[in-house]
Amino acid sequence: MSSAKAITDHNQIRKWAEARGGRPARVKGVEGKGGLLRFDFGEKDESLEEIPWETFFDIFESSKLALLEQEKTAGGRPSRFSKFIRR
C-alpha cells in the first residue's frame, strides 16, 4: 500500500505537480482568500482558472495550507493523488 505525506516546501510541491503534468489553478467563481486551489492535469478543465505559481503560493501561504500528496500508487506508478489540508 502506498502512503501520502504532507509537504509545505514550494519547490517540492511544484516539482511534484510538474512531474505529473499539473498546472497551478483555482476553481472559477469561488471567493475567499484568493480562491480554492487545484492542479489542472492533462486537457484544460473549464471549471478551473490557470494561475501563475507566484499567485498559487501566495494563496497557499495566506490560507496556511499543506499539500497531502502521494508519490506512487499501490501498483508503483506515479500518483496524482493530492489534497490541500490546513497546517
Image (cartoon, rainbow, N blue to C red):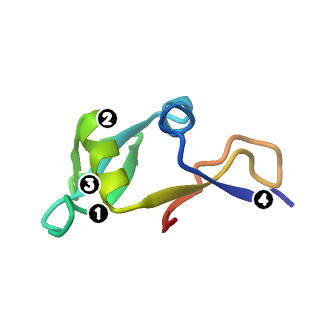
Q: Amino acid at mark 1?
A: Leu
Q: Earlier in the sequence, mark 1 or mark 2?
A: 1
Q: Earlier in the sequence, mark 3 or mark 1?
A: 3
Q: Amino acid at mark 2?
A: Trp
Labels 4, 2: front one: 2
Does dot 2 land on a helix, a strand or a loop? helix
CB within 8 Å, label 3 to label 1: yes
The residue shown at (41%, 39%) is 42
The residue shown at (36%, 52%) is 61
Q: Find residue 10 and report its horizontal and vertical position in percent.
A: 47, 37
The number of numbered badges drawn on the structure is 4
**Left or right, 34 with reference to 21:** left
* Residue 36: image tag: 1
Measure the alpha-carbon separation of dots 4 and 2: 26 Å
Q: Find residue 18 and report its horizontal and vertical position in percent.
A: 49, 31
CB within 8 Å, label 1 to label 2: no
The quarter of the picture where the N terminus appears is bottom right
Q: Which residue is mark 4?
A: 3
CB within 8 Å, label 4 to label 2: no
Q: Which residue is mark 3?
A: 26
The residue shown at (53%, 48%) is 8
The residue shown at (54%, 30%) is 15
Label 1 crowd (10 A; few <14 / some 14-19 / many >=20): some
Q: Which residue is mark 2?
A: 53
Above or below, 44 relative to 64: above
Measure the alpha-carbon separation of dots 3 and 1: 5 Å
